[in-house]
Amino acid sequence: MTKPSYVYVTYIETTAARVWRAITDPEVTGTYWMGPNASVPAHVNVSDWKPGSQWEHQRVDETKAVDIAGTVIESTPPKRLVISWARPAELADTSKHSRVTFDIEPIGDALVKLTVTHEGLEKDEKMLAGISSGWPMVLSNLKSLLERGKALPRVKLETAGPVKG
Amino acid sequence: MRAAAPPCGPRLTCKYLLAYYRDTVKGDLDKVFKALADPTRRRLLDQLHRDNGQTLTALCQHMDMTRQAVTQHLQLLTDANLVAVVWQGREKLHYLNPVPLYEIQDRWINKFERGRLAALRNLKRTLEGDHHDKT
């Protein structure tokens, strides 16, 4: 077992059921799942979320293009969701898939710890760069949506992605 | 660090964990700014940015200080949720968690007109450009 490439944690004043819904229900996802570059439209995650089913990361525009897809590996609402993560063109080649785990852990009765773990990205520099700027933005937006009822305003950045140091 | 005992009552003690997380772990921006206000802790974050998911032993190799001091700095970063800890077998791995930095960006940068900041940065670049090209 290799170590995870990335681990992201956010604490949200909400319930586990609402976090689960925000990840899996396209109606909610489309309101906050933005990339760091405002020229990329919002995305929704579409699946029946049963183990073995396919899931698709679709654009919310007229193209409904699928940018990422994969298989639902484990689905335990509202606690844990494990999915494989691949470019649609590489869906058949599981050696190129990475793996994302959402752990939703209630703390007390009003706070939820959401941990997103992304494993198996070491060999894929381009995907690595994309997700390392994408996940923090998505999670920060999700927190804002569930706590304040709205996602952060989209700001047109001059350059996409993080500044390389 | 022990706070004064709260007024007695079972309800208060029940909520201790939640109160603790609210005050310390849950992305409280005071904690984030305090954690960032120290060069050693910023260096630790840089180390994790370079190579994410390191053990304490690996991190200590880059730091000119005792293991105990590094542990304390890491604890502060963890309390501020800038570092996430994952156990893998018997190894405790430390990950850079940039989510609170995006909250700062939202609260303190996006709010204050990014356009003007960009103009200032461009001006600074233009004025300092020659100097930087030579060095």
Image: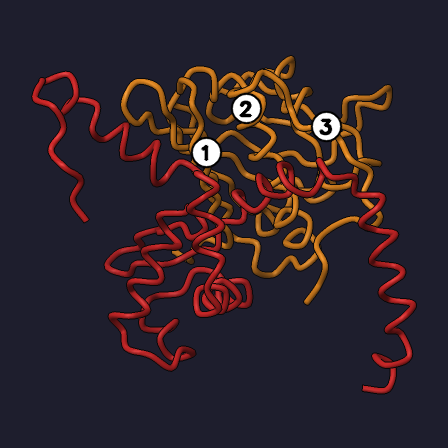
Chain colours: A orange, B red
The answer to which of marks 3 and 2 sits earlier in the sequence is 2
Circle number at residue A23: 2
Please state which amino acid type lies under the numbered disc 2: Ile
Parent chain of label 2: A
Element at badge 2? Answer: helix
Mark 3 to mark 1: distance in Å? 25 Å
Residue A109 lies, in percent from the top left, at: 30, 18
Q: Earlier in the sequence, mark 3 or mark 1?
A: 1
Q: Nearer the viewer, mark 3 or mark 2?
A: 3
Q: Quadrant of residue A45?
A: top right
Is label 2 in contact with label 1 (beta carbons under 8 Å)? yes
Kindly identify the amino acid type of the residue bearing the numbered disc 1. Answer: Phe
Q: Residues within 10 Å of mark 2 (few under 14, many from 20)?
A: many
Q: Report the chain holding disc 3.
A: A
Residue A102: assigned label:
1
Tell which of B73 and B120 is nearer to you.
B120
At 46% from the left edge and 36% from the top edge, which residue is drawn? A10
Give above or below for B128 relative to A92: below
Does A120 sit left or right of A126 as displayed?
Answer: left
Q: Nearer the N terminus, badge 2 or badge 1?
A: 2
Instruction: Identify residue for label 3.
Output: A153
Answer few, some or many: residues within 10 Å of disc 1's Cα (few below 14, many 20 plus, some between 14 and 19).
Answer: many
Figure check: A61 above or below A140: above
